[in-house]
Amino acid sequence: MKHFFCWLIAVMISTVALAQQHDREYHVSVNGNDSNDGSLQRPFKTISAAARMALPGDVITVHAGVYRERITPPRGGDSDTKRITYQAAKGELVEIKGSEIVKGWKRVQNDTWEAVVANDFFGGFNPYKEQIHGDWFTPTPKDRLYHRGAVYFNGSWLMEAANSEQVMAAADAGNPLWWAAVDSAHTTIRAQFKGADPNNAVVEINVRPVVFYPDKPFINFITVRGFVMEQAATNWAPPTAEQMGLIGTHWSRGWIIENNTVQYSKCVGIALGKYGDAFDNKDTESAEGYVGTIKRGLAFGWNKGTIGGHIVRNNTVAYCEQTGIVGSLGCSFSVIEHNTIHDIHVHKLFTGAEMAGIKFHGAIDVQITNNHIYNTNMGIWLDWMAQGVQLQRNLMHDNGLDIFLEVDHGPMLVANNVLLSSTSLLMNSSGAAFVHNIFAGKMDVIHYDSRMTPFMMPHSTFVTALHDNPDGDVRFINNLFVNGSNASQYSSALLPVTFNGNVYTKGATGIIKDKLKKGYGEIDQQAQQKMQRYKEAPAKEERAVTDTTFNAHTRLVNEKASIFLEINTNKNWLSIDRDIVTTEGLGKTLIPGLFFENPDGSPVKITTDYNGKQRNVHPSPGPFEMGAGGKLHFKVW
């Protein structure tokens, strides 16, 4: 707690010393000069120069061009209405890069070329020397070293070769490689350029660990809007260490990150997560270790009034080899909406336990809505303390799996989503409600996990207690199961499972009577004793429509700039008088004893569909309200 108050005092002193509040607009241009005054007529040359001048209420407008710099905002705003705003000039393309152009490539053999760069080119950080490392990071194979650098050819990146011999071989046009060696004075980079002379192209190499990131916590109320930000040498970002993304909030409050393209980060695109301390990546890679991280986070200001509450919207996040948007603790109370997230962890050179389109620990009262997530290893992974979280109106497809809920106790509401990947859910949690979704894939269920994980006071970061993780305490209400969807692993569980108002079409499997093999998570020596507290019981199904001879033939169709869902429907699906789903009808979650509520504490009432259309008094199954059968065509993106 003493550490936390020291930070707050330092921030307050800095703010008071600079407190000439005048709501000024500073301009930045590639043709400017940092000795200018930042006016439209005399703009700065770098964004960093404007950042040094900006005070709460000020706006920094950046004009067209490429800016190769790291922005380290020295201060933030005072409140939501007194922000510091960084924005691209309207209608102008502004690119901020963590890379530099390299020329002077010499051909070695085949399609392999070589460039030798003096080490002082990189300053104090050389990403071709710095290795990726951290808790829950797993090199593949185990003894291989991975570096934070990358090489970009005309904007697209090459992957790191395992050794110098591999990069000297004939190039694979679909998977060109690079390799580097660093001595006391020089960095030698070899890269494959299939059928091309790199000296006649744009070849860039990483030189900066991040693009936009404060170097200290509690830099609050910043808006970042309208930029292309790319090519950063980010490190692995586990939940137990400082999480640095290409852009990151660094343990702060009230950022708005909107209308940006964030891409080509070695590990993480956007980070809403943890600060750094002496415990980073040191004896914390365990459930007990993360409990210690939580305790330290609480002592360092983790509460609703100080940390989180960010808005991340209308961004495109792509080409990151760990996570598109990550956040441990610092993501709480945030809104993640209208983002496109794709091509995350697709090369799979290395692995670990933190890869997904969105990976959050401590998603307390987080709203993840109206996002399009595809071509990722996992769409959304909510790990530890997802409580009061809502996943609504998201489109997910072509992922390894769509949603993973791990050792959470809820309440968690998953409503009006279109989940079309071959695996819809991986469940190692209780306290969830799945309402009005389309499921096109299977569900994998962990029967029991003995880790003791927290649940909190309602709408709060304060820990009530720790609890183990039996399966069950889930509700499937008014969902539509199509294609190869399979919910049979929830045929029985240690806590109650209920199905109500669902529709099963051709290829779908609901509750079955066969005894299924159970999967288990982490198991300690006391697991058998703990499990004796529970009695496995069959799931209950009410008001189901079993239409397994009818092929819904659900698929996505691209039409110009939009995506539509085509689905065959049967009017018999509407024969059941389903109920509008409400807080009262969902009941309490069993372990925390909490109702399903909105983040502001108001009751939940699912009265609109995926597209915002008003639901009928007796609503349709699935995410779209429909009035009749036949082939239907819904715009989903």
Image (tube, grey):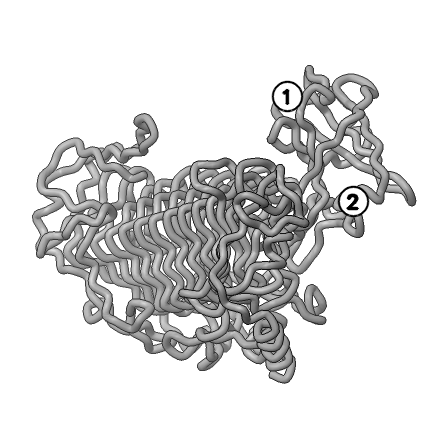
Q: Are marks 2 and 1 in contact (CB under 8 Å)?
A: no
Question: 382 or 429, which lies in front?
Answer: 382
Residue furthest toward the right?
A: 184
The residue sitting at 48% across, 52% down in the picture is 358
Mark 1 surroundings within 10 Å by alpha-carbon count, few (fewer than 14), some (14 through 19), many (20 or more): few
Instruction: Place residue 526 in its image quadrant.
Output: bottom right
Q: Which mark is residue 173?
A: 1
The residue sitting at 74% across, 19% down in the picture is 111
The residue sitting at 40% across, 63% down in the picture is 366
Q: Position of residue 453 (x, y in %)?
A: 50, 72
Q: Which mark is residue 628?
A: none
Q: Is residue 11 above or below residue 483?
A: below
CA distance for labels 2 and 1: 29 Å
- Left or right of 450? Residue 266 is right
Query: Is residue 165 in sight in this rendering?
Result: yes
Q: Amino acid at mark 1?
A: Ala
Q: Secondary structure at mark 1?
A: loop
Q: Is residue 506 above or below residue 47?
A: above
Question: 63 or 139, which lies in front?
Answer: 63
Q: Amino acid at mark 2?
A: Phe
Residue furthest toward the top?
A: 195
Instruction: Place residue 637 in its image quadrant.
Output: top left
Question: 71 or 134, which lies in front?
Answer: 71
Query: Is residue 345 in sight in this rendering?
Result: no
Q: Which residue is mark 2?
A: 122
Q: Position of residue 606 (x, y in %)?
A: 21, 59
Q: Position of residue 212 (x, y in %)?
A: 59, 52
